[in-house]
Image: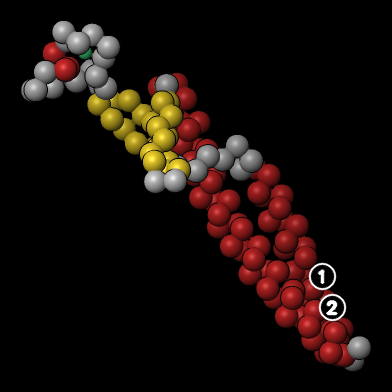
Amino acid sequence: MIVMKQSNNKIKELKRKRNNIFKEMFIYRSCIRGSITKIYKMCSNRECECHSTNRKKHGLASYISSSHDGRTRMIYVPFPMEEEAEKRVEGYKRLRELIEELSEINSEIFKLEKVLKKGE
Ligand SMILES: [Zn+2]
């Protein structure tokens, strides 16, 4: 019976941890999968030097790049939104870590629940 009590307490503790993970997950609800890529821009003026072979570029432009079914998607990030884009991309990484933690906790809970079932 002492094993059952210990298992129950452990489950309670794990479920508490699980709730905290969900709270943290909410913070990253605006996450975007991808990475920030900086590319030198070419302008729309075909006569401009930036189109020539020696490539006089206008400056770095940021994009959120991600692959979808083998294709790369690029979302242009305007300069004032660079920090925001960075945060969203980082949020996705953190969210993935949290899902991994969630799975570990649930595995532990599952194992403990098996022990409790045996004791019935
Ligand atoms: Zn140009």
Checking the image for residue 12, the label placed there is 1
Ligand 1 positioned in quadrant: top left
Q: Is residue 60 above or below residue 27?
A: above
Q: Residue at x 32, y 25 (%)?
A: 61
Badge 2 amino acid? Asn
Residue 41: x, y in percent? 26, 22
SS for callout 1: helix
Vertical arrangement, residue 21 with respect to residue 9, above or below: above
Q: Residue at x 54, y 51 (%)?
A: 94
Task: Label 2, secondary structure: give it.
Answer: helix
**Gap in angstroms between the C-alphas marked 2 and 1:** 6 Å
- The N terminus lies in which quarter of the figure? bottom right
Q: Nearer the viewer, residue 1 or 113?
A: 113
Residue 56, horizontal then vertical, whole percent: 14, 19
Up-down relation of residue 97 to residue 35 (above or below):
below
Q: Residue at x 13, y 13 (%)?
A: 49
Residue that sits furthest to the front in the current view:
69
- Neighbor class of circle 1 (other Cα within 10 Å; few <14, some 14-19, many 20+) is few
Q: Quadrant of the C terminus?
A: bottom right
Label 2: few (<14), some or many (≥20) within 10 Å? Answer: some
Mark 1 residue CB less than 8 A from any atom of ligand 1: no
Quarter of the image where one finds residue 38: top left
Asked if labels 1 and 2 touch by Cβ distance under 8 angstroms, the answer is yes
Q: Quadrant of residue 52?
A: top left
* Label 2 C-beta lies within 8 Å of the nearest ligand 1 atom: no
Against 50, residue 6 (above or below) is below
Q: Amino acid at mark 1?
A: Lys
The residue labelled by disc 2 is: 8
